[in-house]
Amino acid sequence: MSKKLRLFLALLLMSLFILPLPVLAAKKVTTKPTSTTGTTTPSGTTTTTSPTTVTGKTILGYYPVDYSGDKTAYNSVANYGSYFNAISTFTYRVDGQGNLTGTAPADGISLAKSKSMKAYALIHNYINGAFDQTTASTLLGSATARQNVINRLKTILPANGYNGVNVDLENVKGTDRANYSQFIKEMKGALGPLGYTVIVSVPGKTYNDTTSSWGGAFDFTALGQSADFVQIMTYDEHWFGGTPGPIASIGYVTKAVQYATSVIPKEKILLGIATYGYDWYGSSTKTVTYLTVPKLLSQYNVTPQWDDTAKCPWFTYTDSYGQSHQVWYENAQSTAYKLDLVNQYGLGGIGIWRLGFEDQSFWDIVNSKLK
């Protein structure tokens, strides 16, 4: 999730085939044909694997419910639950006074528990289509409001069978850096002794940014000391509404991992993995997924290209109105390179944004790399 990613939540699933989403930074291009069918490793070997219960790594899937009756994420847990071991439900909106609003997806939590998964309650400041900076600043600047959040979590977590909390505050002022770190420290100090896990979602920074509203508020060193896991949102290198390019080039992700591991214990780091891409056209952007890309390729009779520097697929097409489109996305082949980093750097696992956008090929490569 990200300054970024969940700006798409309100727009999500407006279309069965291409859905709107938002978010983050910038990069490059080259070409080489690639296939979107099957699961392809970096060496080019196509594999199909049966599920293996993941025990050594945390495989966390983000679980949004975007409208009443939305079963997209639920169906992922039902169909692919053997491949991962935790969910974070994008559920509770926080206000400046520390009140939490939202309803836990009881069916999803129950299903996850039946598959021996852990479930975390995600709290966020996503309000009216954007991550609200004023809300975050008001909350973080008040010791009373911070304590109110913690007190409410002490009721919400046991009442809904959660194993802990996932804090996803975004668009936070750099000047709130110390207050954010203090908030996570207070939260862990209060919830840890009760047996609850504290996860923080942070931007995939490549250096110690201390000032921007994107990454300045997140002191990786301090957060790594307090939180149980730090999920780095290494996606939206090129973002919804921005210029076309890789969602998560291997160069960007590698630099983000190298910086994170220099200041956070490696076993606490969850690497962000995207299951989507963006279709840029004119001044507009749409979201594509593992499920919708093949339909686009077939509809427009397109052969995708492979950027061998970014280790990502892309393609262009012209729609029926004569509008040119450029699409960059993630598939099993590009994901494989990122999963190799998890093993290479000894990370604690991955955080997947989001459940419901992926297909069997995604889980096959996760199973192959992280089982």
Image: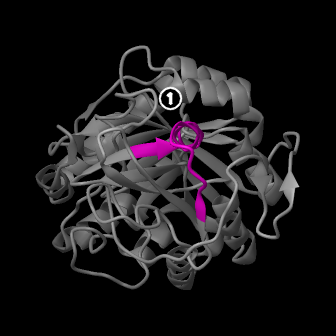
Q: How many marks?
A: 1
For the question of whether residue 271 can be seen, the reply is: yes
Q: Position of residue 178 (x, y in %)?
A: 26, 72
Depth check, front residue: 125 or 6: 6
Question: From what the image shows, is residue 169 above or below residue 224?
Answer: above
Q: Position of residue 345 (x, y in %)?
A: 69, 77
Question: From what the image shows, is residue 172 above or below residue 109?
Answer: below
Q: Tell me the element at label 1.
A: helix
The residue under the point 61% across, 54% down is: 303
Residue 299, magenta (yes or no): yes
> Label 1: which residue?
158
Image: magenta residue range: 287-305
In the figure, is residue 73 to the left or right of 201? right
Name the amino acid type tagged 1. Answer: Pro
Q: Position of residue 196 (x, y in %)?
A: 54, 45
Depth check, front residue: 32 or 66: 32
Question: From what the image shows, is residue 353 above or below residue 75?
Answer: below
The residue under the point 52% across, 60% down is: 314
